[in-house]
């Protein structure tokens, strides 16, 4: 911004614009990442076999003597697939923020006039039976090939898609990997009441977060 000012170049980046962008990044990143973490913990309560498999992979690939680092991500393939499946199933931002169509456009035979407000429905993609086959099932293996390698799917769009994709996507993915791998390595997630596993229900706010639930985090001995 200072460089453009020194060169006397026209720019939309002024103090107000910069402040708003920083506020948006912190606000959007905090709510969405924390919601994804909550969903991950809730799914681990409902699918203890997935939690055990995730922990066993961390022990086998990293051990328990040190904390996971981002350099370990290529080795934690199943764990990466679990995070991807949580993002797909949770669908914490079912509909994106509003956009304006900048020019008259035709899409799939429909005419969208200039200045039309467009709100992409991400949920329709993340929960499409045509795309996923069994979208109602929590199945991390859908993101792994026969050799156990992670398969990137262009239909997995929790951060939206295209030129207006979330600016914090790379940061969020790194945060989720580091935070959740450390949690799984350190704690076993159990329901606060063994006879009452919290349901996979959401509540609406800025993002689709889980209904309030109780969880017991037991420090692992290993």
Image: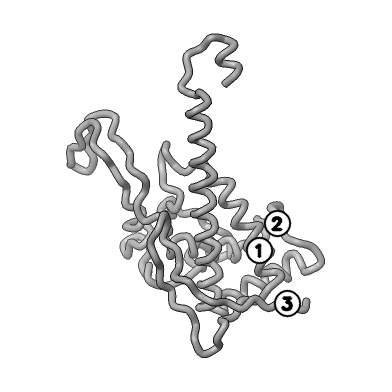
Work out whether residue 112 or residue 56 is closer to the camera in this orientation and state it. 112
Q: Quadrant of the C terminus?
A: bottom right
SS state under label 3: loop
Q: Earlier in the sequence, mark 2 or mark 1?
A: 2
Q: Nearer the viewer, mark 2 or mark 3?
A: 3
Vertical relation: 141 (above or below) 176: below
Quadrant position of the N terminus in the picture: top right
Q: Do residues under tags 2 and 1 come within 8 Å of each other at their CB atoms?
A: yes
| Label at residue 67 | none
Within 10 Å of disc 1 (Cα), the crowding (few <14, some 14-19, many 20+) is many
Query: Is the image coloured rainbow, by chain, by secondary structure, or in one colour?
Result: one colour
Q: Residue furthest bottom?
A: 195
What x and y, as percent, mark residue 150?
Answer: 56, 59
Q: Quickly name the residue at label 2.
A: 72
Say which residue label 3 marks: 220
Which residue is drawn at the image coordinates 60% and 16% (left, top)? 3
Disc with the residue nearer the chain's start (3 vs 1) = 1
Q: Position of residue 83 (x, y in %)?
A: 54, 62
Q: Which residue is mark 1?
A: 181
- Seen at 56% across and 81% down, the residue is 191
In front: label 2 or label 1? 1
Q: Quadrant of residue 94?
A: bottom left
Q: Is disc 1 placed on a helix, strand or loop?
A: helix
Of the pair 156 and 188, the residue shown nearer to us = 188
Q: CA distance from mark 2 to mark 3?
A: 21 Å
């Amino acid at each position: 911004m200072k460089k453009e000012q020194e060169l006397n170049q026209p720019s939309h980046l002024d103090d107000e614009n910069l402040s708003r962008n920083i506020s948006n990044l912190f606000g959007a990143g905090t709510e969405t990442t924390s919601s994804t973490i909550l969903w991950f913990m809730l799914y681990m309560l409902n699918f203890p076999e997935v939690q055990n498999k995730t922990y066993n992979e961390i022990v086998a690939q990293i051990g328990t003597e040190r904390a996971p680092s981002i350099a370990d991500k290529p080795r934690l393939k199943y764990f990466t697939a679990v995070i991807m499946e949580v993002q797909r199933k949770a669908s914490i931002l079912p509909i994106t923020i509003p956009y304006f169509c900048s020019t008259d456009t035709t899409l799939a035979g429909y005419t969208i006039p200039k200045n039309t407000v467009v709100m992409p429905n991400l949920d329709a993609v993340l929960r499409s039976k045509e795309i996923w086959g069994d979208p109602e099932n929590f199945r991390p293996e859908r993101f792994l090939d026969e050799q156990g390698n992670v398969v990137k799917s262009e239909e997995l769009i929790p951060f939206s898609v295209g030129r207006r994709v979330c600016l914090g996507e790379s940061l969020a993915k790194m945060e989720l990997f580091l935070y959740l791998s450390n949690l799984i390595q350190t704690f076993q997630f159990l329901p606060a009441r063994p006879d009452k596993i919290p349901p996979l229900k959401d509540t609406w706010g800025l993002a689709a977060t889980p209904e309030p639930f109780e969880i017991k985090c037991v420090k692992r001995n290993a």
